[in-house]
């Protein structure tokens, strides 16, 4: 007896969202379960569906000679009975005999119904799981249903989602039937059913909102490098453009700020800083501290990602932000540890030699920096213990160190030969040493300084000149005879007193 099940299939398909193929498979399993319950645990039942969605169940039985071998009614049929159904039947052949479902007892029917319900629930769970699993990371819209222990239950149409307290923005409050837009973060199978976890605090929620509101972000003309967020308070995102003629920040802000205002409204007034990503850490750190104006960025340790930022006094509070929020988000955005100082604080700091090198390189002043290294303690990479030991021995400047003999250096307490060798290499790498041969230096010293010293030691006295009283020729006080006329000369001094 064929049963028309087309209406039932249509109803289940519409209400449960299950495909017809899965419904037919469920009906088949239900009828087979009822058959086994009625006739024992046998596998000779066959279920067939017609094109117009009518279902029939058949028992496949073997023709036997009942008078000789006996008959198992569940799996066999006597030859005489088989001949009435099929005159051409012979012993050993198999016949399909239609079974009337009305012959199933009440217990068999109840067992079949239970099997059907369980199968439909499992199919529905698997179907919804596959559907929502593919939507993880996407935005979905639902409606507030109820709240329990801080968790909001959201009606998603086909099923119910949950919005845990930790995934709710502190700015937001909801009431029954309020529209909620959230991000699907997890889809889990639980003993009680399917669980869809939603979030409005995840950074990907902001990313998805930008993809909805900014076409350039959706089509990858503008890409988001990274997003950091303190939900309900502030969000920072770094963007860059794959086309030179597109301003990434301007595209996200929109004409007269229309796009960004729509996003801020969706986030219930949360502040959003959009800045341009730059692979250069100096520029990126400067941009990340927006809206503060940064004067200088100094890389203290590139390996450890340590940086110092100098701002004007009026910009300090803006750069740090309320409770340090702005600089904290900038740290996470750039993946650098940023210390913010004013000009006065920066001047008062004792920056290490390596830091000053970074400052000089920042301004392209490497040559001047090389000339500024004069003390041993200023050498980059110098062992502080070695510098302190030499300082205690009265050797502070590199010039003093080079003037001391190797024997005297080894005699300094707290220093060994290996440390001196390392120090010598640092000096050679960082300080330009001008060496001259001793002979050339002595010769040049004699040429440059000798004549002057002789002039100072024996200055020539000025000689007074007189005229000979006889011929008028010039004579001096040390002459006794006039060189011109030969007259004898004598000089007398008068006492002025």
Image (spheres, rainbow, N blue to C red):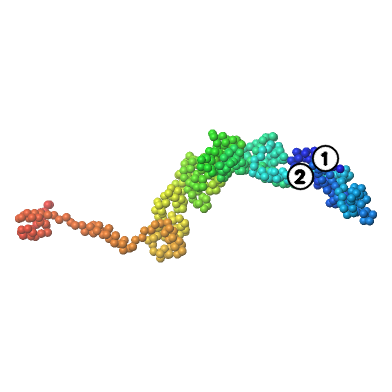
**In the image, which disc is placed on residue 34?**
none
Residue 231 spot, x, y in % from top left? 60, 41
Q: Nearer the viewer, residue 15 or 47?
A: 47
Residue 379 spot, x, y in % from top left? 44, 56
Q: Is residue 23 above or below residue 176?
A: below
Residue lying furthest front in this view? Answer: 88
Q: Is residue 222 above or below residue 428?
A: above
In the drawing, does residue 408 fall left or right of residue 29? Answer: left
User: Splitting the image into 4 quarters, where does residue 399 fall?
Assistant: bottom left
Residue 63 spot, x, y in % from top left? 89, 52
Total numbered labels placed on residues in the image: 2
Q: Is residue 393 above or below residue 323?
A: below
Q: Which residue is mark 1?
A: 4
Image quarter in which the N terminus is found: top right
In the drawing, does residue 441 fall left or right of residue 310? Answer: left
Residue at 87% x, 50% y is 95
Residue 432 spot, x, y in % from top left? 39, 57
The answer to whether residue 76 of the structure is visible from this angle is: no
Q: Nearer the viewer, residue 229 or 364?
A: 364
User: Splitting the image into 4 quarters, where does residue 15 fall?
Assistant: top right
Q: Which residue is mark 2?
A: 22
Q: Of the residues under marks 1 and 2, which one precedes in the sequence?
A: 1
In the drawing, does residue 132 fall left or right of residue 93? Answer: left
Residue at 84% x, 49% y is 45
Q: Nearer the viewer, residue 174 or 278?
A: 278
Tell me the SS state at disc 1: strand
Residue at 43% x, 63% y is 412
Residue lying furthest bottom in this view? Answer: 407
The local crowd at label 2, few if under 14, some if 14 to 19, many if 20 or more residues have their Cα within 10 Å, is: some
């Amino acid at each position: 007896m064929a049963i028309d099940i087309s209406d039932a299939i249509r109803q289940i398909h519409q209400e449960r969202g299950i495909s017809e193929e899965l419904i037919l498979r469920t009906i088949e399993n239900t009828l087979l379960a009822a058959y086994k319950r009625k006739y024992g645990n046998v596998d000779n039942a066959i279920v067939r569906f017609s094109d117009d969605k009518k279902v029939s169940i058949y028992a496949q039985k073997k023709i036997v000679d009942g008078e000789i071998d006996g008959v198992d009614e569940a799996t066999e049929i006597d030859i005489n009975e088989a001949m009435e159904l099929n005159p051409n039947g012979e012993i050993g052949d198999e016949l399909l005999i239609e079974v009337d479902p009305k012959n199933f007892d009440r217990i068999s029917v109840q067992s079949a119904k239970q099997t059907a319900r369980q199968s439909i629930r499992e199919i529905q769970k698997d179907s919804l799981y596959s559907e929502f699993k593919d939507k993880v990371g996407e935005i979905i819209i639902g409606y507030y249903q109820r709240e329990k222990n801080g968790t909001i239950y959201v009606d998603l149409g086909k099923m119910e989602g949950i919005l845990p307290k930790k995934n709710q923005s502190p700015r937001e409050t909801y009431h029954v039937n309020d529209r909620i837009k959230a991000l699907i973060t997890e889809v889990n199978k639980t003993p009680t059913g399917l669980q869809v976890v939603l979030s409005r605090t995840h950074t990907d929620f902001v990313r998805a909102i930008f993809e909805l509101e900014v076409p350039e972000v959706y089509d990858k003309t503008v890409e988001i490098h990274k997003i950091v967020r303190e939900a309900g308070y502030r969000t920072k995102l770094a963007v860059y453009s794959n086309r030179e003629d597109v301003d990434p920040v301007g595209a996200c802000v929109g004409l007269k700020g229309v796009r960004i205002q729509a996003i801020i409204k969706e986030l219930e007034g949360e502040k959003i800083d959009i800045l341009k990503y730059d692979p250069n850490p100096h520029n990126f750190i400067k941009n990340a501290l927006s809206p503060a104006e940064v004067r200088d960025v100094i890389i203290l340790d590139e390996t450890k990602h340590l940086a110092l930022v100098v701002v004007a006094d009026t910009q300090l509070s803006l750069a740090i932000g309320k409770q340090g929020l702005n600089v904290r988000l900038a740290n996470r955005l750039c993946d650098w540890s940023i210390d913010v100082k004013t000009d006065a604080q920066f001047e008062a700091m004792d920056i290490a030699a390596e830091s000053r090198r970074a400052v000089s390189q920042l301004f392209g002043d490497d040559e001047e920096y090389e000339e500024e290294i004069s003390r041993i303690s200023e050498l980059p990479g110098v062992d502080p213990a070695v510098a302190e030991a030499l300082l205690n021995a009265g050797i502070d400047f590199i010039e003093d160190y080079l003037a001391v003999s190797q024997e005297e250096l080894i005699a300094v307490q707290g220093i060994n030969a290996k440390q001196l060798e390392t120090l010598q290499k640092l000096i050679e790498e960082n300080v330009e040493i001008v060496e001259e041969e001793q002979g050339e230096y002595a010769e040049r010293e004699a040429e440059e300084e000798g004549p002057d010293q002789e002039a100072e030691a024996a200055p020539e006295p000025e000689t007074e000149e007189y005229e000979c009283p006889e011929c008028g020729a010039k004579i001096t006080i040390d002459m006794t005879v006039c060189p011109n006329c030969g007259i004898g000369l004598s000089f007398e001094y008068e006492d002025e007193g």
